[in-house]
């Protein structure tokens, strides 16, 4: 007598759509908990962006009806010499402040990483400028670079050197603004780099030391490649912030940008067009140009730092 195994009972087919529908609706409580964020983002994030894009193709003084003008605002933008001057000032300030900031922050992070004592004190001291009121810091730096009573000119007089009208000369204005930006953001980037350095395994440094590698060879062969994602993050964030410089020049030299409008940035020019000239359509076109500028520089940095050395 031959025994055969009984076939297992057939289960009702389960459709993929039904399973997906049940899995989505089973998490409705989590979506409900997250809904305030999406509502706030919709009202204060997505809607202003969409409104600005639409406003760039309109003419509006803030009170009357809006009028569609097509690409007329962008035509004015191309022919506006003040806009190109503001764009030039923004790029110059970016290279005068952001690049030195990242270099100094990297050097400080390496030294702090090798320090044995008082690491916590150094971290607090480096991070204090980043949480200091931006307006208060700008007022302080304006006093430091003051022509008659500033500390910089006082030091120059003490050394027997000629003084400078820092906030009255085009390049003096740029140096003063860049110095403040470097002071404000060096500590923040130092803490970020220090966190990245602490994540690098010490075995790699020990192996390099056994192979006879010096400090420079170790830095460029181990430290810098391992920090590539961290460097990419700081460069992109610094680029986004550096190309939107506003408070520093506004407080230090005023809304007109100082002598020869050498402190006028693109964001300041956008602010003046919107809230002083009441030309919101043209201001919207300037805002889109700022977005394109930030996107372009971010893409360049991503290509240079993020596209190489991947494994």
Image: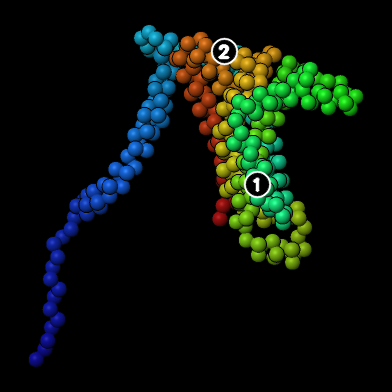
Q: Is residue 219 visible?
A: no
Decide if residue 107 is in sight here: yes
Horizontal arrangement in the rendering, residue 71 relative to residue 158 (left or right): left
Image quarter (top left, top right, bottom left or bottom right) of the N terminus: bottom left
Residue 76's x, y, as percent?
51, 12
Q: Kindly identify the residue that appears in the image at 51 percent across and 9 percent down.
A: 277
Is 146 rendered above or below residue 118? above
Q: Position of residue 265 (x, y in %)?
A: 60, 21
Pointer 2 or 1: first along the chain = 2
Residue 221 or 147: which is nearer the viewer? 147
The residue at 83%/27% (across/down) is: 155
- Residue drawn 27% across the image and 50% down it: 27
Q: Tell me the SS state at disc 1.
A: helix
Vertical relation: 50 (above or below) 206: above
Q: Nearer the viewer, residue 137 or 221?
A: 137
Q: Vertical placement of 216 versus 252: above or below?
A: below
Disc on res. 80? 2
| Mark 2 vs mark 1, CA separation in Å | 45 Å
Q: Quadrant of residue 175?
A: top right
Residue found at the very far left of the displayed protein? 1
Q: Which residue in the structure is indicated by mark 1?
A: 123
């Amino acid at each position: 007598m031959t025994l055969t195994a009984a076939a297992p009972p057939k289960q009702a087919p389960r459709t993929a759509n039904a399973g997906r529908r049940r899995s989505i609706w089973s998490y409705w409580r989590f979506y409900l908990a997250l809904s305030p964020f999406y509502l706030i983002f919709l009202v204060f994030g997505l809607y202003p962006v969409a409104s600005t894009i639409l406003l760039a193709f309109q003419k509006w003084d803030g009170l009357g009806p809006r009028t569609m003008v097509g690409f007329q605002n962008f035509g004015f933008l191309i022919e506006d010499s003040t806009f190109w001057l503001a764009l030039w000032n923004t790029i110059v300030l970016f290279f005068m402040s952001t690049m030195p900031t990242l270099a100094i922050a990297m050097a400080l992070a390496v030294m702090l990483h090798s320090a044995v004592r008082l690491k916590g004190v150094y971290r607090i001291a480096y991070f204090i400028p980043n949480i200091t009121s931006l307006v208060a810091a700008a007022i302080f730096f304006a006093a430091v670079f003051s022509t008659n009573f500033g500390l910089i000119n006082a030091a120059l007089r003490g050394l027997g050197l000629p003084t400078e009208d820092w906030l009255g000369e085009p390049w003096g204005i740029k140096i003063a603004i860049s110095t403040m930006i470097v002071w404000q953001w060096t500590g923040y980037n130092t803490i970020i780099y220090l966190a990245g350095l602490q994540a690098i395994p010490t075995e790699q440094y020990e192996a390099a030391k056994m192979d006879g590698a010096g400090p420079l060879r170790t830095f460029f062969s181990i430290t810098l490649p391992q920090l590539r994602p961290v460097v990419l993050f700081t460069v992109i964030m610094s680029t986004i912030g550096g190309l939107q410089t506003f408070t520093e020049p506004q407080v230090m030299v005023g809304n007109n940008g100082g002598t020869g409008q050498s402190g006028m940035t693109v964001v300041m020019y956008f602010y003046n067009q919107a809230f002083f000239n009441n030309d919101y359509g043209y201001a919207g076109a300037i805002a889109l140009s700022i977005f394109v500028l930030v996107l372009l520089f971010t893409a360049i940095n991503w290509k240079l730092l993020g596209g190489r050395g991947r494994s």
